[in-house]
Structures are given as structure tokens and as C-alpha cells.
């Protein structure tokens, strides 16, 4: 796999750290960066599953849409508001 190709999936907007900070996630890389850099808590079962899904997607073991689904479950676990973005 070429690690520099983006794995696209339907964009999702996350509201992190209150109303002023939000993040639009469009790729597996965006999801991984958000989970590692911006996530409020680095524990939780769904958080770990989402991070693993990102790694699996980088190695083409799972499709990018599974990363999106895992990210949504992790956001729900942390009570992070999210909405699908129509581009």
C-alpha cells in the first residue's frame, strides 16, 4: 500500500473543546490525527478501536468507511457532537 494516498470517506464534522473548535474529518489520516492530537481522552474502548481501525486502514486491512464508523462510536463514547458534512 502507498501510505501517502488518502482514504476518503463521507466527511464528518466534530465539535471538540466547546463551540469554537471543530474539525472536519475527510480521510483516514484526518481521523488518525484527530484521535491522536485533539481527542479529549486517550482511553475508552471505542477510542482504542478507532485508533486500531486507522492503523488497519493504512495497511488496507479494513475499508475507510469502517474508520468513519469507529470514529463516530468513539465520539459518542466521549459525548462529542458530530454531524455528517455534505460537500
Image: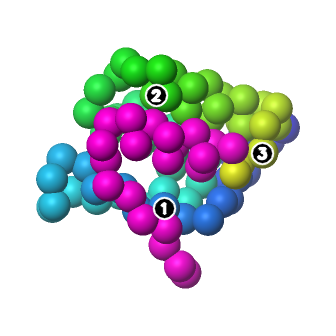
Asked if residue 60 lies left or right of residue 50, the reply is: right
Residue 53 at x, y percent in the picture: 64, 32
- Badge 2 or badge 1: first in the primary sequence: 1
Rendered position, 87 above or below 60: below
Which residue does the numbered mark 2 point to in the structure image? 47
Is residue 75 a member of the stretch shown in magenta? yes
Rendered position, 34 above or below 81: above
- Badge 2 or badge 3: first in the primary sequence: 2
Q: CA distance from mark 2 to mark 3?
A: 18 Å
- Of 82 and 63, nearer the camera is 82
Rendered position, 53 above or below 87: above
Q: Is label 2 in contact with label 1 (beta carbons under 8 Å)?
A: no
User: The N terminus lies in which quarter of the figure?
Assistant: top right
- Of 67 and 28, nearer the camera is 67
Count of number-bearing discs? 3
Which residue does the numbered mark 3 point to in the structure image? 63
Which residue does the numbered mark 1 point to in the structure image? 12
Residue 15 at x, y percent in the picture: 28, 56
Residue 13 at x, y percent in the picture: 41, 62
Amino acid at each position: 500500500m502507498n501510505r501517502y494516498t488518502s482514504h476518503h470517506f463521507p466527511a464528518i464534522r466534530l465539535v471538540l473543546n466547546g463551540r469554537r473548535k471543530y474539525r472536519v474529518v475527510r480521510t483516514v489520516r484526518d481521523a488518525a490525527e484527530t484521535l491522536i492530537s485533539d481527542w479529549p481522552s486517550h482511553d475508552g474502548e471505542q477510542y482504542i478501536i478507532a485508533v486500531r481501525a486507522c492503523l488497519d486502514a493504512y495497511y488496507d486491512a479494513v475499508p475507510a468507511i469502517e474508520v468513519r464508523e469507529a470514529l463516530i462510536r468513539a465520539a459518542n463514547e466521549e459525548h462529542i457532537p458530530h454531524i455528517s458534512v455534505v460537500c
